[in-house]
Amino acid sequence: MRLFPPAAARQGLSAQPVFARRGLFGAACACAVLGFGAGRALAITPAAAKPLHAKLDAAAQAVGPKLLAWRRDIHQHPELGNQETRTAGLVAAHLRALGYEVRERVAVTGLVARLQGGAGPGPHVALRADMDALPVAEEVDLPFRSQARARWEGAEVPVMHACGHDCHTAILMAAAEVLAANKAQLKGQVTLLFQPAEEGAPTGETGGARRMLAEGAFSHGKPDAVFGLHVVSGLPAGMLGFCPGPAHASSDTFRIVVHGRQTHGARPWAGVDPIVIGAQVVSALQTIQSRQVDVDQPSVLTVGTFHSGARHNIVPEQAVMTGTLRTYDEARRDYMQRRVKEVAEGVASGMDGRAEVTWAPNGYPTTVNDRVLGDRMLPSLARVVGEANLRMAPRSTASEDFSYFAQQAPGMFFWVGVGPRDQNLRDNPTNHSPRFRVEEDGLLPGLRGLLHLVADYTGSAV
């Protein structure tokens, strides 16, 4: 995702599975979802359970200790985008042992695996998990706390799974094991996508979902539906969240270089001051959102950096700004990009300077949950956690390159609560925080959710 209790229980983390130690389906206080789901249930009637669902649930419970072991191992050995060699090797060995057809090194370190059901023809379903970590120094005291460091953008940095991708990878590894064990009862085909570089590739490299697609992730045929999940600390463990339609904003990065003319700071009239021009550009850009677009369709335009000059008494030659754009609509996205260029260039020209605006080519489109697919499959998630624990989640201004897969096939992306049940989550450290913490008993509902979605969408649970 781009951007964006008792000590013994949390630090000791005994070998006994968390799933066995806690009441998995205990109801969380509605107020605990403030800031994420506003406590509102989706009011979806759970779908009826069939024998296959019970079998999958029992298998999920049984694989629980392995899921935790994988998650903790990957958490302790995080890897940055396009560097996930150890993680990919762990996944590939596991999948091959289960009998999957595995293709490695898709988009540098990604994997694509296929499983053909043994119960006859049926739909083709894809499941996606991202594997990369972030350049963040972990501040959570755990036995499997990350001490890893790596090279990123020319510097040595600490590395942490601060967004929960270790959980996603472990959940999909567990799902792979359960599906393979129940292959004889599955219809159709399942494709597993273990994706690198969701948080972005190093400068000068490409990666992630778009590159996986370009390198043939769906070369054996586009799936009929693609499912993904993301753990979030703003939702209590035991709850799942869903947002129909646009769920994650698009993300684009811009760079503006304002060219002036250098002079002595005591004689500004002898030059053209790019700092003053840049300041006017920043102010003018804010009027695009506040005065030029309909407020019914939200968007965010933020200037995040402004660099210029090296000495207090010199008017510099140029000023450089960078920022981000978030939208939920492609038309708005195109309009905002065009207006940023026009406004910056116009302001600079009017002040006797010049502005160059460039947009990075690796932006992410809006992640859109297909409404028809969502309506069809939400009863499956309601079966997993109960009607009261399936929550309407607000749209997120964070971005997700799951969006590229969802452009190829109807997509459904849901949130898995990993926040503490017993406190107000408003001040809980968020994803990307060095204090991001996972309540591991929230992982089983995510695993069961994927399994139920596959069983129901393929028509295997009859």
Image (cartoon, grey):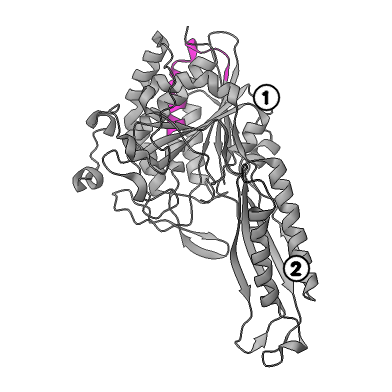
Q: Position of residue 101 (x, y in %)?
A: 57, 25
Quarter of the image for residue 303 reads bottom right
Q: Quadrant of residue 389?
A: top left
164 lies left or right of 399: left
Q: Secondary structure at mark 2?
A: helix
Residue 458 seen in the current view: yes
Which residue in the structure is indicated by mark 2? 347
Disc ID at residue 220:
1
Task: Estimate the x, y position of residue 450 in percent, counting from the top left.
Answer: 47, 25
Residue at 68% from the left image edge and 56% from the top image edge: 288
- Name which residue type carries label 2: Val
- Check if residue 176 falls in the magenta segment: yes
Quarter of the image where one finds residue 307: bottom right
Judged left or right of residue 234, residue 114 is right
Which residue corresponds to the image point at 32% horizontal and 53% vertical from the top-left?
140
- Mark 1 or mark 2, which has the lower sequence index? 1
Mark 1 residue element: loop
Between residue 171 and residue 275, name the one nearer to us. Answer: 275
Please, is residue 223 above or below residue 271 in the view?
A: above
- In the image, the segment drawn in magenta is 171-189
Residue 84 higher or lower than 323, as above or below: above
Q: Is residue 435 above or below residue 405?
A: below
Q: Residues within 10 Å of mark 2 (few under 14, many from 20)?
A: many
Q: Main secondary structure of the magenta part?
A: helix
